[in-house]
Amino acid sequence: MDLEHPSITRTMKTGYPVKKLPVTVCANESCEAPIYPGQHVWHKGSDRYCNLKCMHESMYETK
């Protein structure tokens, strides 16, 4: 383990981990929740959804 890595050093000094920035947002227009690195997501093509409910709503939305 590299103890000189900036995120490890900051955690050791402050006790707080570095905040992760979102990679993208949910493709469902009514949700648009941020999706963070390491979070489980659902894919349809290049679209990413935060959960299966959002994917279903986006695919089968009533007009």
Image: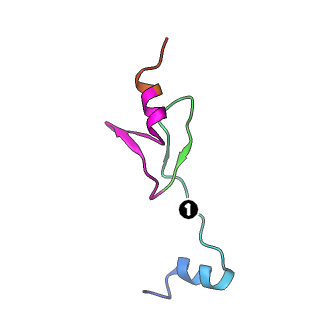
Q: Which amino acid does label 1 sit on?
A: Lys
Question: Any magenta on residue 49?
Answer: yes
Above/below status of 34 relative to 18:
above
Looking at the image, which residue sits at the far right?
A: 14
Question: Any magenta on residue 63?
Answer: no
Q: 53 or 47, which lies in front?
A: 53
**Residue positioned 60% across, 79% down in the render:** 11
Position of 39 with respect to 43 (left or right) is: right
How many numbered badges does the structure rendering display?
1
Looking at the image, which residue sits at the far top?
A: 63
Task: Tell me the SS state at disc 1.
Answer: loop
**Residue positioned 42% across, 86% down in the render:** 1
Q: Where is residue 13 in the image (x, y as percent from the top left)?
A: 65, 85
Above/below status of 11 relative to 37:
below
Above/below status of 63 relative to 6:
above
Position of 37 with respect to 21 (left or right) is: left
**Residue positioned 36% across, 40% down in the render:** 43
Q: Give the range drawn in magenta.
A: 37-56
Q: 7 or 53, which lies in front?
A: 53
Q: Where is residue 29 in the image (x, y as percent from the top left)?
A: 53, 29
Coloring applied to the structure = rainbow
Looking at the image, which residue sits at the far front?
A: 53
Which quadrant of the figure has residue 6?
bottom right
Q: Name the residue under label 1.
A: 20
Q: Position of residue 12 (x, y in %)?
A: 61, 84
Neighbours of disc 1 within 10 Å: few (<14), some (14-19), many (20+): few
**Residue positioned 60% across, 72% down in the render:** 17
